[in-house]
């Protein structure tokens, strides 16, 4: 039985089977651990039930596409995740263009359905510290409304970030999704939480993706999240993506629609300011 007071270093030793020679714990974040054989690893504690399983399954599913590199999973249990530690460098234009093409290949590797969880991943997963249910569906507009937008509208109302009378503004957008969604596309293999903090610019000039909330979804959702929170060399990323797998006409006008999901997640996690952004975005969409 594992001691509930076990630290990151002890967890790394247990899960990798190698002694630990050094440990550096970050405040409120993962720990960097040096194994006795010289290998550096990242050790992360799960935020909730199933969180480690979901993240590990997501990393393996993304890796299986052979597109965008991700840190290798070296060990896990219900509480701890151990992955390789990637030395970081500076963002660069060439790396960004290459990443765009790799992201297109990742999306193109597909998923069994919208909302499909990674193999061995739980249906009850997480996006950051917010619960996220991976419930498979068929048509994207209905699935996106029912499984990605409306659950967080309800949660935001329950927590007071969104006023009950305001929910209808977002609900009206959901009603119009079939006409706003653009051409039908097959389910894409999404990272699912693709903000700039989860895009790791490696010292070797390669981009890696970390902390996924992986599931089957619409490829424009990943790209919209990159735009929402900003990303270095985003124009070069989009160029690389478009050259590899052009987006459907009108994609730029649909960005706000795809941003509703992360905005509402952030409203649940961080409060009113994100709810106001979600409302403003919904009103803009309603005017389309």
Image (cartoon, rainbow, N blue to C red):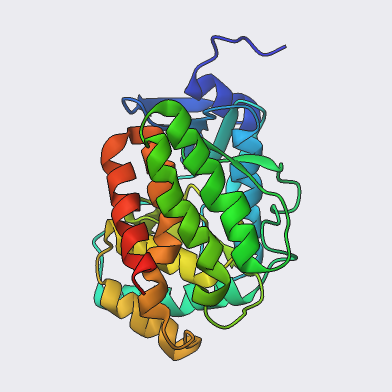
Q: Is residue 17 left or right of residue 177?
A: right
Residue at screen point 51% across, 52% down = 71
Percent position (x, y) of residue 164? 42, 36
Which quadrant of the figure has residue 65? bottom right
Res 67 seen here: no
Q: Quadrant of the C terminus?
A: bottom left
Q: Nearer the viewer, residue 99 or 3?
A: 99
Percent position (x, y) of residue 83? 53, 43
Q: Nearer the viewer, residue 153 or 3?
A: 153
Percent position (x, y) of residue 92? 25, 71
Numbered marks: total: 0
Which quadrant of the figure has residue 61? bottom right
Residue at screen point 31% across, 65% down = 284
Q: Nearer the viewer, residue 170 or 239?
A: 170
Whether 183 is drawn above or below 147: the answer is below
Percent position (x, y) of residue 162? 37, 37
Q: Which residue appears farthest toward the front when viewing the image? A: 165
Residue at screen point 38% across, 66% down = 286
Q: Quadrant of the N terminus?
A: top right
Q: Nearer the viewer, residue 149 or 225?
A: 149
Q: Is residue 193 left or right of residue 195?
A: right
Res 157 seen here: yes
């Amino acid at each position: 039985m594992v001691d509930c007071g076990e630290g990151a270093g002890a967890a790394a030793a247990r899960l990798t089977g190698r002694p630990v020679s050094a440990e550096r714990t970050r405040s409120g974040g993962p720990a960097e651990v040096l194994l006795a054989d010289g290998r550096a690893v990242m050790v992360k504690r799960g935020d909730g039930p199933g969180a480690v399983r979901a993240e590990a399954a997501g990393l393996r599913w993304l890796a299986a596409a052979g597109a965008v590199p991700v840190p290798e999973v070296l060990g896990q249990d219900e509480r701890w995740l151990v992955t390789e530690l990637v030395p970081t460098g500076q963002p660069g234009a060439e790396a960004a263009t290459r990443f765009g093409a790799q992201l297109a290949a990742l999306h193109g590797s597909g998923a069994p359905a919208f909302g499909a969880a990674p193999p061995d991943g739980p249906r009850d997963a997480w996006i950051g510290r917010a619960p996220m249910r991976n419930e498979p569906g068929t048509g994207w507009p209905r699935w996106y409304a029912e499984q990605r937008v409306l659950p967080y509208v309800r949660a935001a109302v329950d927590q007071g970030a969104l006023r009950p009378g305001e929910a209808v503004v977002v609900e009206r957008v959901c009603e119009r999704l079939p006409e706003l969604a653009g051409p039908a596309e097959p389910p894409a293999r999404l990272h699912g939480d693709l903000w700039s903090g989860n895009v790791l610019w490696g010292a070797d000039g390669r981009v890696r993706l970390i902390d996924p909330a992986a599931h089957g979804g619409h490829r424009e959702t990943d790209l919209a999240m990159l735009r929402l929170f900003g990303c270095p060399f985003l124009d070069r990323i989009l160029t690389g993506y478009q050259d590899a797998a052009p987006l459907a006409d009108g994609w730029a006008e649909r960005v706000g629609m795809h941003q509703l999901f992360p905005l509402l997640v952030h409203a649940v996690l961080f409060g009113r300011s994100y709810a106001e952004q979600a409302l403003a975005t919904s009103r803009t969409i309603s005017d389309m």
